[in-house]
């Protein structure tokens, strides 16, 4: 394929959208939208802008939940990605239900079909990438909606309705697995 060299400020080539829920240091539930993540075995890596409220709080409280939304939650995804927990208790503005996790001190979002209960293990802040905080966390529990499980209790991959986020610094949009 012939290629054109481009000079984009970033290139997000389709990452699953996730909602990170946590109790802040005052015990208030809050939530932020993320797309920078990957997981290997019981480890998950997340990338945050260092100035966000969620990362500042997770560095203090350690526990959080990764919730995987489906297409029906697009408005919630955008709301949580536009507002900061610094000034907004986001759950008070959304039709989302929080349920306390049994294994970490963090709220699960009931409306999301998949939730991973996590505890922070490592914070990576490098002078090579100022303004970015990467974290590693251990996954202590996994919760999956019945609709996403087959008869053997394994993932029914065809049920997934995740959103993939693309952004080149100017153009941004979602694509859907089932479209
Ligand atoms: C689809 C989407 C994906 C996003 N991905 C990230 C991300 O990977 N890392 C990040 O720091 N911010 C990301 N953001 C931006 C944050 O959600 C946004 O800055 C938010 O207001 C931060 O909230 P907080 O201050 O409560 O943490 C994303 C936003 C959207 C809408």
Image: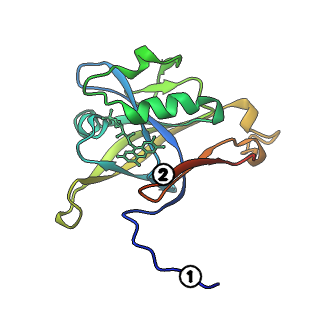
Q: Closer to the observer: label 1 or label 2?
A: 1
Q: Nearer the viewer, residue 155 or 10?
A: 10
Q: Residue sitting at 64 percent across and 35 percent down? A: 71
Asked whether mark 2 and ligand 1 are closer than 8 Å, the reply comes as no
> Residue 129, relative to residue 51: is it above or below?
below
The residue to which callout 2 is attached is 42
Could you classify mark 2 by the number of other residues whose Cα lies within 10 Å: few (under 14), some (14-19), or many (20 or more)?
few
* Residue 125 relative to residue 81: left or right: left
Q: Residue sitting at 67 percent across and 31 percent down? A: 145
The residue to which callout 1 is attached is 3
> Residue 9, relative to residue 52: is it above or below?
below
Q: Nearer the viewer, residue 166 or 25?
A: 166
> Residue 15, relative to residue 8: is it above or below?
above
- Ligand 1 quadrant in view: top left
Q: Residue sitting at 59 percent across and 30 percent down? A: 73
- Identify the residue at the far left of this view: 127
- Which numbered disc, 1 or 2, marks the residue that appears first in the sequence? 1
Count the numbered circles shown. Answer: 2
x and y percentages locating residue 159 in the rendered image: 75, 41
The residue tagged with tag 2: helix, strand or loop? loop
Q: Nearer the viewer, residue 148 or 37?
A: 37
Could you classify mark 1 by the number of other residues whose Cα lies within 10 Å: few (under 14), some (14-19), or many (20 or more)?
few
x and y percentages locating residue 97 in the rendered image: 52, 17
The residue tagged with tag 1: helix, strand or loop? loop
């Amino acid at each position: 394929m012939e290629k054109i060299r481009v000079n984009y400020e970033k290139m997000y080539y389709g990452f699953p959208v996730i909602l990170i829920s946590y109790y802040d240091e005052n015990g208030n539930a809050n939530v932020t939208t993320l797309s920078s993540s990957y997981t290997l075995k019981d480890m998950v890596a997340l990338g945050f802008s260092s100035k966000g409220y969620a990362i500042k709080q997770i560095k203090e409280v350690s526990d959080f939940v990764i919730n995987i939304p489906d297409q029906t939650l697009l408005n919630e995804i955008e709301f949580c990605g536009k507002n900061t927990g610094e000034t907004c208790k986001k759950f008070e503005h959304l039709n989302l239900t929080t349920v306390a996790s049994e294994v970490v001190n963090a709220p699960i979002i009931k409306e999301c079909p998949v939730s991973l209960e996590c505890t922070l293990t490592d914070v990576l802040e490098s002078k090579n990438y100022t303004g970015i905080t990467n974290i590693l966390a251990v996954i202590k529990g996994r919760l999956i909606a019945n609709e996403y499980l087959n008869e053997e209790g394994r993932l029914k991959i065809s049920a997934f309705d995740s959103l993939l986020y693309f952004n080149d610094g100017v153009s941004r949009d979602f694509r859907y697995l089932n479209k």
